[in-house]
Image (cartoon, rainbow, N blue to C red):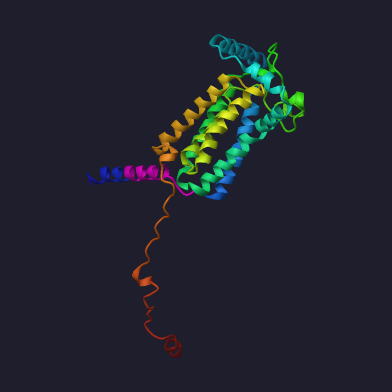
């Protein structure tokens, strides 16, 4: 009996480790669960982001500090880029629509592509994206920041207002539906870089890999040209993505692109020999005989 308790504890410990190991192993994603999860996650993201108090005075003060820091570093060229691109109407209007829509559309498309073509890597990549978003939400709460277009005396052009671009949640009739002082970090950069690295690391076609690298590069230019972010906001987005990948690596023990492409189907349990389809079903006596005896 003295040996029974340690053996039972060891068994429970091994069972717990096996269960944890099972949870950390990639599984085949289920479409209905993923749709619900992504929809719920985006709803929570929007709710939390817009629930962060709009601390206008602090956000404007932080924007002045960021601008001064970039000026000291010699990288404060956002205003020059903003004015130069704004002079080309078709280009800046295209960038306004790009900023308002593609960060969501492209991210969902990459998730769908992963789901169908790389199911074994899907969960790890999704975890990196979700952890990146969670870190960004924490940044919005801890460091309110006004975008360049809202700075006092910054002389930036709010390109959405000037060109009356439809659909932006940052200006115009929609501005009261979105927190205007959540510029640090740039989730556009975090998400676009996640998309770019995922496509570059997993796509086989050279043109797709090139597009993967171009997407975050163009996004960086767009967020600056439209006066929605500073360069340092983009650096914040990169840091959030690095945190996201660290969380994914800690859980799965590997980066997404190093995991198996597909998850093997679970083995079917073998049927007992007595229930095999090849074995005849034996009866002790015919049914007619039983009926006749009643």
Q: Is residue 132 magenta?
A: no
Looking at the rendered structure, the number of numbered marks drawn on it comes to 0
Q: Is residue 190 left or right of residue 222?
A: left
Part of the protein shown in magenta: 12-28
Q: Is residue 51 left or right of residue 249?
A: right
At horizontal 51% and vertical 32% (from top left) the residue drawn is 131
In the image, residue 76 sits, relative to residue 175, either above or below, namely above
- In which quadrant of the rendered view does residue 186 lie? top right
At horizontal 52% and vertical 33% (from top left) the residue drawn is 213
Q: Is residue 122 left or right of residue 254?
A: right
Judged from this view, the residue extending furthest toward the bottom is: 292
Q: Where is residue 133 in the image (x, y as percent from the top left)?
A: 55, 31
Q: Where is residue 127 in the image (x, y as percent from the top left)?
A: 49, 37
At horizontal 58% and vertical 38% (from top left) the residue drawn is 107
- In which quadrant of the rendered view does residue 147 lie? top right
- Residue 4 or residue 111, whichever sits in front: 111
Does the rendering let one see residue 64? yes
- Residue 84 or residue 29, whichever sits in front: 84
Q: Where is residue 266 in the image (x, y as percent from the top left)?
A: 41, 55
Report the quarter where the C terminus lies: bottom left
Does the rendering let one see residue 187? no
- Residue 155 or residue 23, whichever sits in front: 155
- In which quadrant of the rendered view does residue 34 lie? top right
Q: Is the magenta stretch mostly helix, strand or loop?
A: helix
Q: Position of residue 282 (x, y in %)?
A: 37, 80
In the image, residue 91 sits, relative to residue 278, either above or below, namely above
């Amino acid at each position: 009996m003295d040996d029974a308790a340690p053996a039972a504890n060891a068994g429970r410990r091994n069972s717990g480790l096996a269960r944890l190991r099972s949870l950390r192993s990639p599984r085949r994603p289920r479409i209905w669960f993923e749709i619900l999860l992504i929809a719920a996650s985006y709803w929570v993201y929007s709710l939390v982001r817009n629930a962060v108090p709009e601390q206008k005075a602090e956000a404007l003060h932080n924007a002045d500090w960021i601008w001064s820091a970039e000026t000291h570093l010699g990288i404060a060229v956002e205003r020059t880029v903003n004015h130069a691109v704004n002079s080309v109407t078709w280009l800046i209007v295209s960038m306004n629509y790009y900023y308002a829509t593609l960060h969501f559309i492209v991210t969902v498309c990459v998730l769908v592509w992963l789901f169908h073509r790389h199911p074994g890597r899907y969960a790890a990549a999704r975890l990196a994206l979700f952890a990146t978003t969670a870190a960004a939400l924490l940044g919005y709460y801890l460091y309110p920041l006004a975008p360049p277009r809202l700075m006092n005396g910054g002389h930036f052009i709010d390109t959405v207002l000037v060109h009356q671009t439809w659909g932006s949640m940052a200006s115009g009739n929609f501005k009261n539906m979105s927190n205007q002082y959540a510029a640090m970090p740039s989730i556009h950069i975090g998400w676009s870089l996640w998309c770019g690295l995922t496509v570059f690391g997993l796509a086989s076609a050279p043109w797709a890999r090139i597009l993967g690298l171009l997407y975050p590069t163009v996004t960086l230019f767009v967020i600056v040209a439209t006066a929605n972010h500073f360069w340092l906001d983009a650096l914040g987005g990169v840091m959030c993505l690095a945190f996201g990948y660290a969380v994914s690596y800690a859980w799965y023990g590997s980066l997404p692109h190093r995991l198996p492409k597909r998850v093997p189907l679970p083995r079917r349990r073998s049927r007992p020999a007595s229930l095999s389809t090849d074995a005849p079903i034996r009866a002790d006596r015919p049914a007619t005989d039983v009926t006749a005896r009643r």
